[in-house]
Image (spheres, rainbow, N blue to C red):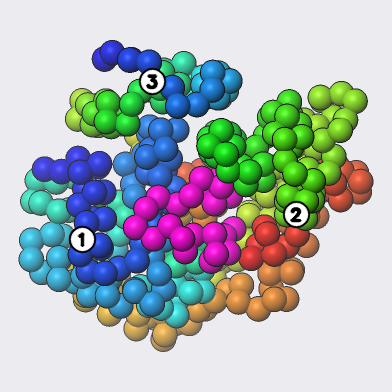
């Protein structure tokens, strides 16, 4: 999928995203909103992307590794 | 068949049509902000007073083609009392016969947020600084989102991003750009902002680590209270009424069953409702952070947010 450059944030922001989340996710983050969502739909349709399987949601501090 | 994104928009539309005040939060809000990809669940903060309308909406959908069910194990009854006590509800929803199960998590009072943090966001995604605060869980994988949301906020001229940013050099840069009064105000919420003038960047990194450990430790203690109360309740319930939960029955029947069990077997309505309970959790969390980081008293003092911020 093409990664048309569209950068509402600074280069430093995308560099930090790439450092923390990986280059691919940082490239996705640069896309315009509609294209970003289209790409996400494509991933959801074509891959069994793992989701957070925590019984407790993260915001209640759960985690799949918790008893 | 609906995709996770289609379902999330459809569910939001239904709540809007029913006049249910809602705010999108957590992973899907991060998707909206272009910072996270790998979530399919939707998490919502719903106005406490609108929970009866939400329960009614869900019952109606369940009777007219959707399949709405409680998810296994954790979750309090969808009642105003429990939702205002910090509990959550967790649903699995099929919006068509061939649809995958969509997960919906519902908050009344989300952890780490005071109500004024989200009530301006009804109908939208949770604002970035509040979402960053909610993402300060004790899972390391959530913290890059805290940092990213903070930087997004600051680059969109929202100074509240300074309450969450975790980049030493950028913290110093953005702090210098703030009026002194505003910075002093934010320092009361995030004491670390008073310690940005360090001779070595690594000193600031150390303080950021201690600060993160404090958030994680207090959150872990908070979570432990809800976990213990739920497990104790569930054991009493299963001792008294053996059988599977959730039973295969309609959403309304499940809700009625859970509500009755909560009353009979004593699921506490508000485990941290008393000030002394929150104080105890806060102190235990600080002791835990001390133990894990071997931080000095000075480092803890330099980074410890007020209890009203970390455990409102």
In the displayed structure, B132 sits above or below A5; it is: below
B151 displayed left or right of B194: left
The verdict on a common chain for dots 3 and 1 is: no
Residue A33 x %, y %: 32, 31
- Near-viewer residue (B311 or B171): B171
Tell me the tag on residue A6.
Answer: 3
- Residue at numbered disc 2: B185
Q: Verify CB contact (< 8 Å) between mark 1 and mark 2.
A: no
Quadrant of the rendering where the N terminus of chain B is positioned: top left
In this view, A52 is above or below B306: above
Q: Earlier in the sequence, mark 1 or mark 2?
A: 1
Task: Tell me the mark number nearer the camera, choosing from 3 and 1.
Answer: 3
Q: Does the rendering let one see residue B101? A: no
Front residue of A6/A20: it is A6
Q: Position of residue B112 (x, y in %)?
A: 59, 58
Label 3, label 1: how far apart the Cα atoms are: 32 Å
Horizontally, is B94 left or right of B52 in the view? left
| Extreme residue toward the bottom, this view | B264
Give the structural element (helix, strand or loop) at label 2: helix
State the residue position of label 1. Answer: B14
Q: Chain of mark 2?
A: B
Image coordinates of residue A6 in percent, x first then y, are 38, 20
Residue that appears at 67% across and 57% down: B310
Image point (37%, 34%), residue name = B38
Residue at image location 78% in from the left, 51% down from the top: B181
Would residue B77 be counted in the magenta stretch? no
Mark 2 surroundings: few (<14), some (14-19) or many (≥20) residues within 10 A: few
Q: Which residues are magenta?
A: B112-139
Q: Image check: B250 left or right of A10?
A: left
Q: Nearer the viewer, residue B174 or A27?
A: B174
Measured Cα–Cα span from mark 2 to mark 3: 35 Å
- Of badges 1 and 2, the one in the foreground is 2
């Amino acid at each position: 999928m093409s990664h048309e450059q569209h950068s509402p944030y600074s280069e430093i922001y995308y560099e930090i995203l790439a450092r923390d989340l990986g280059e691919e996710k940082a490239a996705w983050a640069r896309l315009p909103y509609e294209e970003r969502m289209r790409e996400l739909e494509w991933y959801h349709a074509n891959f069994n992307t793992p989701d957070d399987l925590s019984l407790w949601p993260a915001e209640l501090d759960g985690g799949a590794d918790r008893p | 068949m609906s995709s996770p994104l289609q379902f999330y928009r459809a569910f939001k539309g239904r709540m809007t049509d029913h006049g249910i005040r809602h705010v999108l939060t957590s992973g899907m809000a991060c998707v909206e902000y272009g910072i996270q990809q790998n979530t399919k669940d939707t998490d919502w903060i719903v106005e406490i007073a609108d929970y009866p309308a939400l329960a009614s909406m869900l019952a109606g959908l369940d009777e007219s083609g959707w399949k709405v069910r409680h998810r296994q194990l954790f979750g309090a009854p969808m009642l105003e009392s429990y939702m205002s006590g910090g509990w959550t509800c967790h649903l699995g929803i099929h919006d068509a016969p061939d649809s995958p199960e969509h997960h919906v998590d519902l908050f009344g009072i989300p952890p780490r947020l005071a109500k004024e943090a989200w009530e301006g966001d009804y109908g939208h995604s949770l604002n970035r600084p509040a979402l960053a605060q909610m993402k300060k869980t004790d899972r390391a994988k959530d913290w890059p989102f805290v940092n990213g949301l903070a930087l997004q906020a600051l680059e969109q001229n929202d100074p509240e991003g300074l309450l969450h940013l975790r980049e030493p050099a950028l913290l110093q840069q953005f702090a210098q750009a703030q009026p002194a009064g505003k910075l002093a105000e934010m320092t009361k919420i995030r004491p670390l902002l008073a310690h940005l003038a360090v001779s070595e960047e690594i000193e600031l990194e150390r303080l950021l680590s201690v600060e993160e450990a404090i958030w994680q430790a207090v959150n872990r203690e908070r979570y432990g209270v809800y976990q213990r109360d739920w497990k104790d309740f569930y054991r009493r319930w299963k001792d008294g009424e053996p059988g599977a939960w959730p039973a295969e029955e309609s959403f309304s029947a499940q809700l009625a069953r859970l509500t009755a069990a909560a009353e009979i077997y004593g699921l506490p309505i508000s485990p941290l409702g008393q000030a002394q309970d929150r104080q105890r959790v806060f102190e235990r969390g600080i002791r835990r952070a001390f133990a894990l980081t071997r931080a000095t008293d000075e480092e803890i003092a330099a980074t410890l947010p007020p209890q009203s911020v970390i455990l409102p």
